[in-house]
Amino acid sequence: MSDQTNEAEADATRPAPPVDAPDVVEALETLPRRRDQLLPALIAAEHALGWLSEAAIEDVSVHTRIPLSEVYATATAYSELRLEPPVEGRWHVCTGVTCRQAGADALLDALAGSGESAEPVDCRFLCALAPVAERGGALFGRCEAQRLIALAVEDGDRS
Ligand code: FES
């Protein structure tokens, strides 16, 4: 029996993945069902949902055929993966070394001083665009406080 036949039979007997959101399942289906796809699968699920819910982590476990405990351990090991839903309207400002050198602390102060909700986060691995901020799943690079405040005012949901 070929490996493909064994894989197809294994798929047929595997329980359906927990459906968190159709977008998560669709995003995972674009990736091979392999162990080496764990991190890409977690990132894809987070991009699809905006964060990694327990169900999304289960979806990744089923898709990659990696035990749930291992998937959860990986998800919690990477600070850039979000395990809580984003707070609407809150800015997340990277305070990694590069962003700090590019003015992240001043950015946080300016946002707080203007009444914006903002919190520091770890490196987002977009260091070339420092300082980096994120809000509602959208990433902004080479941030200037006035531009971010203006965006928040345009959105009309200062928090
Ligand atoms: S230090 Fe800010 S994105 Fe890396």
Image (spheres, rainbow, N blue to C red):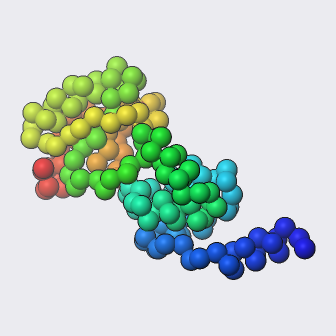
74 vs 49: above or below: above
Q: Quadrant of ligand 1?
A: top left
Q: Nearer the viewer, residue 107 or 77?
A: 77
Residue at left 33%, top 29%? 95
Taking the view exactly as shown, the residue that stands out farthest to the top is 101
Which quarter shows the N terminus?
Answer: bottom right
154 vs 106: above or below: below
The spot of residue 93 in percent (x, y) is: 29, 36
The spot of residue 105 in percent (x, y) is: 24, 25
Residue 149 in which image quadrant = top left
Residue at left 22%, top 30%? 107
13 vs 126: above or below: below
Q: Is residue 51 left or right of residue 37?
A: left
Q: Is residue 84 left or right of residue 27?
A: left
Residue at left 44%, top 45%? 76
149 vs 67: above or below: above
Taking the view exactly as shown, the residue that stands out farthest to the right is 1
Residue 129 in sight in this render: no
The number of numbered badges drawn on the structure is 0
